[in-house]
Amino acid sequence: MILRAPPWRFGAFVQMRNLVRSRVKEHFRYAVVLVVLLAPVFSARSAGQAAFQAHGGGVQPPARETPMPFRAGETLDYTVSWAAFSTAASVQLSVPEQRNLFGWQAWHFRAVVHTLSHVRTLFEVDDQFDSYTDAGTLESRQFELHLNEMGGSSDQVLHLGQSSGRSRQPGPIVLVLPGTRDPLGALYSLRGVNWQTVPEFRATVYDGSDVYEMRAQRDAADESVRVPAGSFSASRVSIRVFQFEKEVSLMHFVVWLANDAAHTPVVMQATLPLGNLRAELLAPAK
């Protein structure tokens, strides 16, 4: 005798399975971006309260370039563990170039994320994020999201500006507060902070959907950290995320910056409801 579930029950099971799979995939991608870019991508939330698009933007004179510890051509490779998966994803952070962007001298930062091994059998993620950050003010001028996930793909190019006047950038711009970073630019900004004299670093961050505040402080000046790339003396920096003056308490982030000339991120870690995520540097910078 063979027992068969009623069709409506099987259909409900399939819908529930697909929903759970989709939510896990979504949260894992967000978690990778959280730990690598040190910022939550709350794409399900409306950005209407924080930023909006307009045709135009203020034309500002170029600022004097801010000295930074990294260089054009730098490439950093990381292995990512998540929950019970020791090899969940690979991440590459790079600085492809410094270039002129619509009259601004800008750093070009890039992050590439791929799921691996058993996690990839659950959901394929092959995402790329590109940041064009003003070399003088460290404000984001352009942020790109190129997402390729589970057979679907999307591309978004965002031009950020501070006023509704004449703009250098083509097409509509997203109006944000002066000094606003994108998530990738915010991570690289942390490397330029002089933690010996700055007790706390704050930055407004726009992730393509929402605006929030990142608050970072150095908790330890000299910790010994061992990763596949070797052993490092590193400063431990904790990061908290706020929205509407309230801390997003379910998420906590820590980054260990090597005490070297480049302030290389050797470990990035997130404590999240769906499991801890940790990215470790695989090899010295290329």
Image: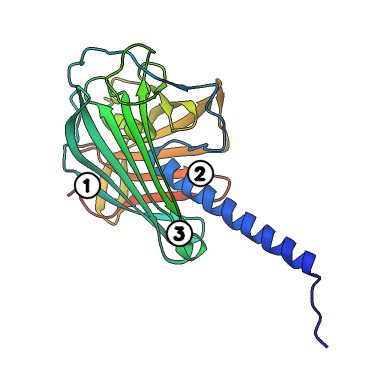
| Residue 229, picture quadrant | bottom left
Q: Nearer the viewer, residue 87 or 64?
A: 64
State the mark number for residue 188: none
Mark 1 or 2, nearer chain start: 1
Residue 248 in picture, x, y percent from top left: 56, 31
144 left or right of 14 in image: left
Q: Nearer the viewer, residue 190 or 124?
A: 124
Compared with 234, 81 (above or below) is below
Q: Are marks 3 and 2 in contact (CB under 8 Å)?
A: no
Mark 1 or 3, nearer chain start: 1
Amino acid found under the numbered disc labelled 2: Thr
Amino acid found under the numbered disc labelled 3: Glu
Residue at image mark 2? 271
Amino acid found under the numbered disc labelled 1: Thr
Residue 53 in picture, x, y percent from top left: 45, 23
Q: How many marks?
A: 3
Q: Residues within 10 Å of mark 2 (few under 14, many from 20)?
A: some
Q: Is residue 57 visible?
A: yes
For the N terminus, the image quarter is: bottom right
Residue at image mark 1? 75
Q: Is residue 261 visible?
A: no
Helix, strand or loop at disc 2? strand
| Residue 19, picture quadrant | bottom right
- From the viewer's perspective, is the residue at label 1 or at label 3 nearer? 3
Residue 191 in picture, x, y percent from top left: 27, 32
- From the viewer's perspective, is the residue at label 3 or at label 2 nearer? 3
Helix, strand or loop at disc 3? loop
Residue at image mark 3? 124
Mark 3 or 2, nearer chain start: 3
